[in-house]
Image (spheres, grey):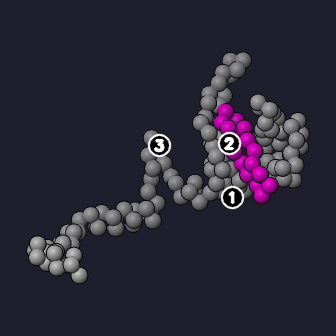
Amino acid sequence: MALKDLQIKQGDVDIIVEVVEKGQIREFNKFGKKGRVCNAKVKDETGTMSLTLWNDEIDKINVGDRIHIQKGYVGEWQGEPQLTAGKFGSITVVSKSQSSMDTETTDEGEHILTEDEKEEEEILNEMDEEEPPLEESYTEDEVEEENVE
C-alpha cells in the first residue's frame, strides 16, 4: 500500500511511512474527558499526507521515525485526506530516528549530553581557553609595498 493510493473514507490501511513533521500538541476536553491531539506529516516514496496522532501516540513518535500503521483510517479535514490509527488501528515505530535515540532529557526537560556531545564540548572549551595566534603587524611602508606589487 502507498500513500498515493489512499482514498478518503478508506479503512483497514496498512502502510509504513516516515514522519517528516510534527506539529504542536493541543489539549481538548470532550464529554468531560481530557485528551491531546497533534498533526504530523508523513511520507513514502509516492508522496506525503497528514497524520493525526492522539494521546499516547504523540509521545512515542518523533520526526525521522519510520512507523507502521495497521488498520488505519483515512479521514478528511478541510477537503484533504488525513491518516489516523483511529479507534481500531495501531501505530508501531519500526525504526527510531537517530536524533531521538541519542537524545535524553531530565525530568525537568533538560537535555542530557551523550558521550559524543560531552567530548565535543570539552574540545570546544579547550579551544576557547587557548590563546589566539598573534597577528603579524606591518608598517605603513610594508603595506604600501604589498599593495604596489
Left or right, 72 with reference to 125: right
**Residue under label 1:** 95
Q: In the image, what residue type sits under mark 2?
A: Ala
Residue 98, given in percent of the width and then of the height, sits at 59, 60
Crowding at label 2, few (<14), some or many (≥20) Cα neighbours within 10 Å? many
Dot label at residue 109 = 3
Q: Which residues are magenta?
A: 37-57
Q: CA distance from mark 2 to mark 1?
A: 17 Å
Q: Is residue 85 visible?
A: no
For the stretch drawn in magenta, the main secondary structure is: strand
Crowding at label 3, few (<14), some or many (≥20) Cα neighbours within 10 Å? few
Labels 2 and 3: the sequence-earlier one: 2
Residue 48, relative to residue 119: is it above or below? above
**Which residue is outermost to the front?**
148
**Residue 56 lies in the magenta-colored region:** yes
Q: In the image, what residue type sits under mark 1?
A: Ser
Labels 2 and 1: the sequence-earlier one: 2
